Image: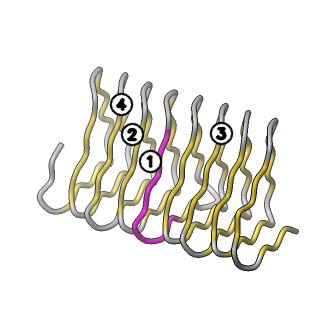
Amino acid sequence: ILAKNNFTNSGDVSAGADVTLSGNTINLGGRISSNNNVRVVSANSASISGDLAAVGFLSVNAGPLDVTGTVSSRGKLTLTSSGGARLAETSLVVSDDDVDIGAISVDVRGQVSSKKSLAVAVNEAAFISGKAAVGDHLALKALRADVSGSLVSNGTIKFDTSGDQSIS
């Protein structure tokens, strides 16, 4: 689906093949699912308040990214933001594979879950007041990290910060 300007979904879209959504601004309030891969590419901002699901890999690439809904995949899940990424209290990001989050800054208030590993890499600040649970390894790379939420890993937890770290 290619939208020259804005794309808004409030219904239910299910596909047996790959789904690619591309537009300037993307607002997903309904359900979009694929029995294969899902790609969301926004030149500006993306907002996910509904359900975005893939049996294969799932990737979202946007300017500012705001997630208040559910983003899930059985394959690798990647969230990339050229601005800030906000995962609200109501958000659920879950994968049977690896989860990668990359942004200028990230604010995780909801839940991120991976049966494998979670890698969060941000240029500025990472705020985690929600829950991150992984089966393997959890890696956080940021200029500054403030963790008041829950980090659970069956493997290692690695912090790489060049600025302040706060874990409470």
Please state the horizontal and vertical placement of residue 25, each as a whole percent of the image: 27, 63
Read off the magenta span. Answer: 77-85
Q: Which mark is residue 126?
A: none
**Whole-number angstrom distance, CA of label 2 to CA of label 4:** 15 Å
Q: Separation of disc 4 and disc 3 at Cα?
A: 19 Å
Q: Quadrant of the C terminus?
A: bottom right
Q: Which residue is mark 2?
A: 31
Relative height, residue 121 to residue 72 (above, below): below
Q: Secondary structure at mark 4?
A: loop
Q: Quadrant of the N terminus?
A: top left
- Of badges 3 and 2, the one in the foreground is 3
Q: Residue at x 77, y 66 (%)?
A: 147
Q: Is residue 73 left or right of residue 132?
A: left
**For mark 1, what is the residue?**
50
Q: Is residue 137 above or below residue 147?
A: above
- Type of amino acid at the residue the image marks with label 3: Ser
Q: CA distance from mark 4 to mark 1?
A: 18 Å
